[in-house]
Image (cartoon, helix red, strand yellow):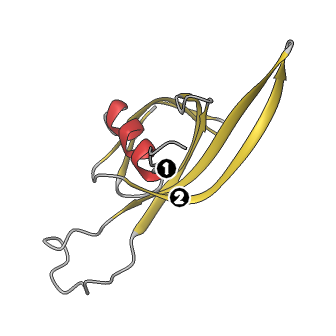
Amino acid sequence: MSDHKFDPNQIAVQHLQRCNNQINGYWDEDEFCEVITFNKKLEPELLSSSLGISSVEAENAHWLSLKFALTINPNVQDLPDLLPNQEKETLGELTLVLDENLKVVDENWLIDLNSPHVWAKS
C-alpha cells in the first residue's frame, strides 16, 4: 500500500494557482469572455467525485472527475460586524478531470458573471 495521501482540495488549489486565479477564454451561453478575474482569493470546496474508465484503442483509460464549489470568505475589514461563522459566498463551480497519474487533463468552469467579485473582459 502507498503512504500517499490524496487531497482533492489541494489539487484544486494548485490548479487555481497555476491559472493565477483567472480564466482565459470562457463561454457563458452566447457570450464569450476573453479573461475572467476574481477580486478575492477563491477557495475550492469538494462537492462530488466520480471514477470512470474510457476505452482508448486496446487499453482502458481511468479518470477521476472532481467537482468543486468556488467560494470566497467575506472580508472582515469590509464587513466589521460579520459573524465568524458567516456563510461563504459561492462564485461558481470548477470540474477537474484527472488521469491515472492525477494530472489535470480537462477542466470545466461555471462562473456567476453577475457577482461583484468577478470581472469579465468581453
Determine whether, in the image, residue 24 is placed left or right of residue 76: right
Residue at image coords 31%, 66%: 73
Query: Residue 46 got which mark?
Result: 2
Query: What is the three-letter code of the residue carrying label 1?
Result: Pro
Query: What is the three-letter code of the residue carrying label 2?
Result: Leu
Q: Is residue 99 visible?
A: yes
The part of the image, by quadrant, that contains residue 121 is: top left
Q: Secondary structure at mark 1?
A: helix
Q: In which quadrant will I find the N terminus?
A: top right
Label 2, residues with CA under 10 Å away: few <14, some 14-19, many ≥20: some
The part of the image, by quadrant, that contains residue 20 is: top left
Q: Answer above or below: position of 9 versus 106.
A: below
Image spot of residue 101 (x, y percent): 55, 28
Image spot of residue 24 (x, y percent): 44, 27
Q: Answer above or below: position of 15 versus 61.
A: below
Determine whether, in the image, residue 34 is placed left or right of residue 106: left
Residue situated in front as seen by the camera: 33 or 65: 65
Q: Residues under labels 1 and 2: Cα distance?
A: 7 Å
Verify CB contact (< 8 Å) between mark 1 and mark 2: yes
